[in-house]
Image: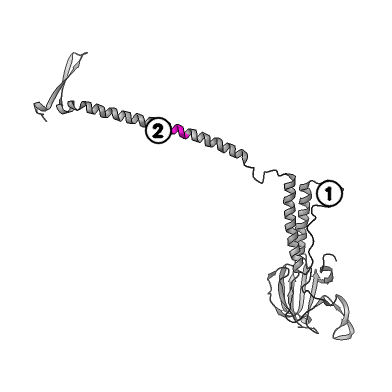
Amino acid sequence: MKFKPSGVSTVIIVDKNKGASKTLQVKTKHISRLKHYAAGVLSLIVILAGSIIYLNNENNKQQAEKAILLKQITQLKTQVPPPVSTQVKAPENKAQTYIQEIEAKLQTINTYLKKRGLKGFSTKSVGGNGDAETGKFTDEEKYSLYDDYLSRFLNAVAFTPMGYPRISSLTSYFGYRSDPFDSGHAEFHPGIDFKGERGDAAKCTANGRVVFTGWFGGYGNCVRIQHKNNFETLYGHLSKIVVRVGQEVTAGEKIGEIGSTGRSTGNHLHYEVRKNGKPVNPIAYLSLNN
């Protein structure tokens, strides 16, 4: 394309080494705007340089802030106590922890006893009797042994028949007695009888599982509960049974209502404790002091 002579300027380029020259035709308007182009390029360079300086300063600030935060984190770590699993507690803290655990177990034991009509015991004195042998143990050993003992005792109290299935007076005891249907003969009574009225609640005396419900010969309506340590309890002459075979029951839970079913002369609760399948005197299990 050819430009009009008035709109074109000729630029001569001389090569000093070769002694030759070249001509270059450029629109005249571009030459007049050259200073504008130069100003634009210069402005762009200034902007880029300014941006680089700004970003560099911001990066330096972030690095400085990061260094400060890392220093603060390091200081905070020294102030945070180690995890409980690795933390060495002061002896008094260990003792206090064990005492609290022991008192909680004693409170649970007292709950079991009260459900059975027994008086609980005091938790004011814990941690040994202070004799010479006790003094040989460290606090940790002393309270740990006591805690272990109470854990086993708690299990025994929960699953061993203990206390009263019915809070009332006794009308007949364990052993040989005069036959209530024939006073001229004696019979062996394998349990104890509690006075009561028809409909009064009969409660189990230990945690366990119901293994029999229903009519059981001279016992009439009867409930038998299997406990740990080869114990079993029997509740006879009931007017109503409120549990079922296979049901898990807890100490103090109602299992039926008093009546006079079976071989009975009046409303009362017949209660037996069996060890390894043989009746034992329930009187021995009515109180911790027997």
Q: How many marks?
A: 2
Q: Amino acid at mark 1?
A: Thr
133 in relation to 19, above or below: below
Secondary structure of residue under mark 2: helix
Place of residue 4 in the rendered image (x, y in percent of width and height, measured from the top left): 9, 28
Place of residue 128 in the rendered image (x, y in percent of width and height, measured from the top left): 82, 52
Q: Quadrant of residue 243?
A: bottom right
Q: Nearer the viewer, residue 144 or 47?
A: 47
* Residue holding disc 2: 55
Q: Quadrant of residue 45?
A: top left
Secondary structure of residue under mark 1: helix
201 in relation to 88, above or below: below
Q: Is residue 28 left or right of residue 173?
A: left
Place of residue 6 in the rendered image (x, y in percent of width and height, measured from the top left): 9, 26
Q: Residue at x 40, y 33 (%)?
A: 55
Q: Amino acid at mark 2?
A: Leu
Q: Quadrant of residue 20?
A: top left
* Residue holding disc 1: 134
Q: Nearer the viewer, mark 1 or mark 2?
A: 2
Q: Residue furthest front?
A: 124
Give the magenta part as a residue range.
Answer: 56-62
